[in-house]
Image (spheres, rainbow, N blue to C red):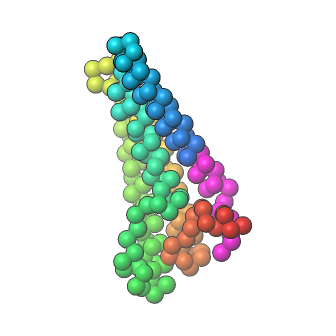
Amino acid sequence: MGMKPPAAVRSIDRAINSVTAVVVVAMMVHVTVHALSRFLFQAPLPVTNELIEYMYMPIVALLGIPSALLQREHIVATLFTERMTVANAVFFRALGAVIGVVVSAAWAFFGAREATHNMEIQAVAGISAVTIWPIYFIVPIVFTILAALYAYNAVMIIRNNEPDPDLLLEKAAES
């Protein structure tokens, strides 16, 4: 029970949380400066809305998905598995994790295709000149990480014969 998670999983969690925190703080500073500039100088910062919509928010929203899985703050419907025998619960939770791998890998694949297409056409935000194609690469990056985490989850479920393994926090805190 007191087993520590692999260093790679802890590093992924720290990196995701750090990047998200930096982006949230940057967004807050940007919005505050924008509001002050509008109030004090009647000249708001240009393209603030585009940067928030196409840069800050996608990063925060997408990085929240693997973070929720790692910190066990994702939605889990245990209505059926809590009434099953441990063996059946392990099977269905592992199956769910494998389905998560497949779906996440598909999102990563098609997200990479879309990101590559947007790079080729040099996508911009609406009628502004704000370049947004680089942010599209966050989709394949996040969903590749998520696929790896689901694979790790499936392995932990099967290896520990436990339908709801803690991937990160509680076991790391115990040791």
Measuring from the top left, give residue 82's x and y in whole percent: 42, 81
Residue at 47 percent of width and 60 percent of height: 73
Can residue 116 be seen here? The reply is: no
* Residue 123 belongs to magenta span: no
Vertical placement of residue 114 versus 159, above or below: above
Can residue 53 be seen here? The reply is: yes
Quadrant in which the C terminus appears: bottom right
Vertical placement of residue 16 versus 136, above or below: below
**In this image, 162 relative to 172: left or right?**
left
Quadrant in which the N terminus appears: bottom right
Measuring from the top left, give residue 110's x and y in whole percent: 37, 45
Q: How many marks?
A: 0
* Residue 6 belongs to magenta span: yes
Vertical placement of residue 102 versus 63, above or below: below
**In this image, 33 relative to 157: left or right?**
left
Is 28 in front, or is 3? 28
Residue at 44 percent of width and 52 percent of height: 65
Q: Residue furthest bottom?
A: 85
| Location of residue 74 (image quadrant) | bottom left
Measuring from the top left, give residue 113's x and y in whole percent: 38, 40
**In this image, 1 relative to 32: left or right?**
right
Residue at 45 percent of width and 42 percent of height: 60
Measuring from the top left, give residue 77's x and y in whole percent: 37, 71
Is 128 in front, or is 18? 18
- Give the main secondary structure, helix, strand or loop, of the magenta stretch: helix
| Location of residue 127 (image quadrant) | top left
Instruction: State the extent of the magenta-drawn residues as a range.
Output: 1-15
| Location of residue 140 (image quadrant) | top left
